[in-house]
């Protein structure tokens, strides 16, 4: 988790505090205090200042904490969003051996117990995933030897891809485990091997969501067929404009079977911007018309929470959660811009 909101979500879901890692390059004092108060005792630190802040707050709380040192290490080119191997705000430059030596020594109330890497996200090819993990393990081993540090925990991050807003299955990555096992064996005997941690949120929940949307209008403009939907980038993939996600290329299915021929169509949302596009050119059955319901699969990872929720103040999609066909909850987040502005004025 990397915010107090994510912490609450994890704890509400029944996660034990000793199973939570607090990460992120910009932790605030209050976020660290919230984690300490909740019983979190494992953090990932990204600089000496980040470590010293954690140490100061842990001492004030009377808590002893462990931490991982996050590395910005050399890596390949796979993935839609690179986090290491180039200038980014993530981790400590592995060429800065002075900072690494300082971070891999205990300081007051905090103790280093391992290292943290995260090379990229959404890497589809198993060979590329395996190569990146192997390179990360080699780098961790080199850093550990230079600092005479024996890691108990090695967080290799994520990178596992999942289909988004289209049909598809998860890659199983069978040979990745063999590659990782061989890389570990090169550097550590079995008795001293660090515990591995992976951050696989997209892979775990990507398939656990469907977007249901209704067609508001069908028309042709300058030779192009458009389907205007009641769902746009305010409920799916809006953060693609920030470079955080790939632009959505939603491939919907009509609710119920349809054998009608398809015509290339631009799927757009209701927002007053030409950027509100869910797919620029996708085959859509010819019998889809105003009022038709479409389903867009595999939106569990980056759906509503990675969208432009407040843009133009459109209603936010209702989220219905079900377990084995039984509805567990149905809710809609409400953002009241006027109320937010009044609260900001009150605090000014």
Image (tube, helix red, strand yellow):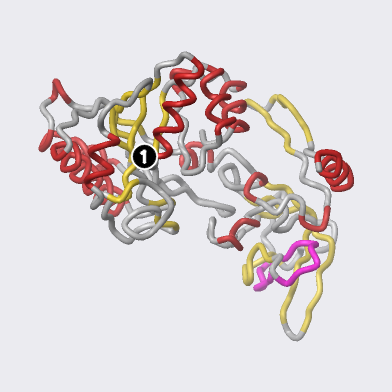
Q: Compared to 81, does 318 lie above or below?
A: above
Quadrant of the rendered image containing residue 138: top left
Query: Measuring 37% from the left and 35% from the top, which residue is drawn there?
Result: 198
Of residue 143 and residue 120, the one placed in the foreground of this image is 143
327 left or right of 177?
Answer: right
Query: Measuring 73% from the left and 34% from the top, which residue is drawn there?
Result: 320
Query: Measuring 83% from the left and 53% from the top, which residue is drawn there?
Result: 313
Residue 143: image location, x then y, percent = 19, 41
Quadrant of the rendered image containing residue 326: top right
Residue 100: image location, x then y, percent = 26, 41
Query: Measuring 46% from the left and 21% from the top, which residue is drawn there?
Result: 58
Residue 190: image location, x then y, percent = 13, 24
Of residue 52 and residue 225, the one placed in the foreground of this image is 52
Q: Compared to 19, does 316 lie above or below?
A: below
69 left or right of 238?
Answer: left
In this rendering, the count of numbered labels is 1
Looking at the rendering, the stretch of residues picked out in magenta corresponds to 261-274
Residue 61: image location, x then y, percent = 51, 17
Is label 1 in a helix, a strand or a loop?
Answer: helix
Q: Compared to 21, does 219 lie above or below?
A: below
Of residue 223 and residue 138, the one placed in the foreground of this image is 138
92 left or right of 325?
Answer: left
Considering every residue shown, the one lying at the far bottom of the view is 222
The residue singled out by tag 1 in the image is 48
The quadrant of the picture occupied by the C terminus is: top right
Residue 336 among those drawn in magenta: no
């Amino acid at each position: 988790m990397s915010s107090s909101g994510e912490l609450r979500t994890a704890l509400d879901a029944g996660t034990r505090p000793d199973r939570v890692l607090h990460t992120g390059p910009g932790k605030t004092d209050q976020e660290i205090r919230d984690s300490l108060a909740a019983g979190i005792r494992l953090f990932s630190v990204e600089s000496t200042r980040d470590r010293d802040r954690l140490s100061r707050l842990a001492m004030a709380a009377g808590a002893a904490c462990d931490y991982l040192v996050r590395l910005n290490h050399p890596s390949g080119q796979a993935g839609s969003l690179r986090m290491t191997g180039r200038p980014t705000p993530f981790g400590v430059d592995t060429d800065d051996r002075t900072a690494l030596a300082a971070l891999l020594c205990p300081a007051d109330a905090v103790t280093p117990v391992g290292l943290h890497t995260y090379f990229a996200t959404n890497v589809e090819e198993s060979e590329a995933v395996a190569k990146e993990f192997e390179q990360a393990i080699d780098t961790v081993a080199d850093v550990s030897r230079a600092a005479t540090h024996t890691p108990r925990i090695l967080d290799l991050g994520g990178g596992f891809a999942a289909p988004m807003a289209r049909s598809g299955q998860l890659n199983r990555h069978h040979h990745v485990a063999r590659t990782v096992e061989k890389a570990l064996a090169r550097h550590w005997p079995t008795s001293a091997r660090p515990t591995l941690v992976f951050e696989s949120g997209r892979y775990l929940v990507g398939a656990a969501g469907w977007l249901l949307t209704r067609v508001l209008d069908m028309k042709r403009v300058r030779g192009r067929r458009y389907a205007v939907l009641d769902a746009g980038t305010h409920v799916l993939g809006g953060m693609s404009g920030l470079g955080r996600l790939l632009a959505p290329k939603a491939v919907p299915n009509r609710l119920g079977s349809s054998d009608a021929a398809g015509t290339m169509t631009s799927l757009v949302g209701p927002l007053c911007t030409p950027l509100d596009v869910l797919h620029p050119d996708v085959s859509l059955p010819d019998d889809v018309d105003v009022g038709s319901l479409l389903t867009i699969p595999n939106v569990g990872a980056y759906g509503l929470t990675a969208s432009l929720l407040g843009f133009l103040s459109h209603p936010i999609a209702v989220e219905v959660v079900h377990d084995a066909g039984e509805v567990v909850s149905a809710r809609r987040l409400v953002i009241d811009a006027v109320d937010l502005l009044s609260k900001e004025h009150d605090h000014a």
